[in-house]
Amino acid sequence: MTMAGTYTFLTRPPDPNSSRPPTPPALPFPDLDGSSVYLRRAAVAADPMPSPPAAARNILVTGGAGYIGSHTVLQLLKGGYRAVVVDNLDNSSEVALERVRELAGEFGKNLGFHRIDLRDREALEKVFSSTKFDAVIHFAGIKAVGESVRKPLLYYNNNLIGTIILFEVMAAYGCKKLVFSSSATVYGSPKEVPCTEEYPLCAINPYGRTKLMTEDMCRDICQGDNEWDIILLRYFNPVGAHPSGYIGEDPRGIPNNLMPFVQQVAVGRRPALTVFGNDYSTKDGTAVRDYIHVVDLADGHIAALQKLFEGSHIGCDVYNLATGRGTSVLEIVAAFEKASGKKIPLVMAGRRPGDAEIVYASTAKAEKELHWKAKYGIEEMCRDQWNWASKNPWGYNKLPETAANGNGKFHSFLPLLAHISCRL
């Protein structure tokens, strides 16, 4: 297949005269010059690759440099797809894509990247005009619950306007297959568990409402135009990292989720973990959530994509991606301590208003219709999370000069306690 246009490919040989990687060249898609990717750490072995499909499909991945996006892009490449990432790098790193390409081995040549914001219609149209896309996986968006309460207009502007422009450009260029990254936040604070896809929807914060509004847009689009096929995927607490330890979660600023906080305490970046609520009606008094390995989650996107390409019209459908099992905060901490050999200091605090006691999902629909089921348990999640954290204690950035003492040990920048949210 011959395609017009140019892509920025991740082909960075190191410049011996510079401490920073040079700007990558623009290369015609899908050709590659064969040079190796420059990584800020040691080279990694490529993942074992299955046989690619006879006719590779072109998939646009918005937000593909982020935590879930980068793992999904790797699984796409492993499956023989061509992936083009658009990301503004607001809360992600291009280094993640460099490492994805290296992990993908010979199929890394099928990865392209554009640094653009979805609200830049002209830039997005240039991407669509250069390649005929078969489908889009839409991750792009900001997602901090607390920030969304303080800055609701920021969330509505970024998450909704960017999505509307994406949908308009997709329609204009005849790309009407979509997998949307939704969230279990659309269930609000459920009164019963497990949550099924038919559970009443009630988002309780601006971030959750942007997800629910986007779901409503998708349903309306499919109702008005039967050429569209859209799958909505509702996530439950992604954790873990790629088994290689070379890609993982690297939040900027104070993490909003449990596992990144735990790992930052383990590597010495934060002094302790504050647990909100230890008097719930659970086995150990702490809140229970449904944690899922990020690789399982990425595979769920591939399963959804395959369903879109089966040929039959599906309209708009929705699936929970989870394990169907609940794990408490203290159980997560204990599993991480076992995996890492590190003691995680805890500070117990009172419950916070609005936090649900127990939330976990029913996964029967995804298992039956997507032929997908989570493979990994808490032990593997914590093992891979620690592998990533121990190899990359400061994420994708180099170790700050002020972060290590003369003995090479870390000492914390932040004297404040590590506060952790147990929300979805």
Image (cartoon, grey):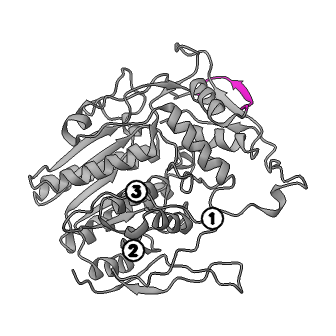
Q: Is residue 361 above or below residue 301?
A: above
CA gap, disc 2 and disc 1: 20 Å
At label 2, which amino acid type do we have?
Lys
At label 1, which amino acid type do we have?
Ala
Toward the viewer: 155 or 290? Answer: 290
Taking the image as drawn, is residue 75 in sight?
yes
Q: Residue 412 appears at what percent x and percent y?
A: 80, 47
Q: Earlier in the sequence, mark 3 or mark 1?
A: 1
**Crowdedness near tag 2: few (<14), some (14–19) or many (≥20) residues, C-alpha within 10 Å:** many
CA gap, disc 3 and disc 1: 19 Å
Q: Earlier in the sequence, mark 2 or mark 1?
A: 1
Residue drawn 58% across and 21% down?
286
Q: Residue 137 appears at what percent x and percent y?
A: 32, 59
**Crowdedness near tag 1: few (<14), some (14–19) or many (≥20) residues, C-alpha within 10 Å:** few
Residue drawn 70% across and 83% down?
18
Question: Mark 3 highlights which residue?
Answer: 48
Question: Mark 2 highlights which residue?
Answer: 109
Q: Is residue 404 magenta?
A: no
Question: Mark 1 highlights which residue?
Answer: 42
Q: Is residue 313 left or right of residue 81?
A: left
**Does dot 1 land on a helix, a strand or a loop?**
loop
Q: Is residue 331 above or below residue 213?
A: above
Magenta stretch in the rendered image:
343-352
Residue drawn 47% across and 74% down?
115
**Does dot 3 land on a helix, a strand or a loop?**
loop
Which image quarter: residue 222? Answer: bottom left
User: Main SS type for the magenta part?
Assistant: loop
Q: Residue 56 appears at what percent x and percent y?
A: 24, 68
Q: Earlier in the sequence, mark 3 or mark 2?
A: 3
CA gap, disc 3 and disc 2: 16 Å
**Does dot 2 land on a helix, a strand or a loop?**
helix
Q: Residue 311 appears at what percent x and percent y?
A: 10, 56
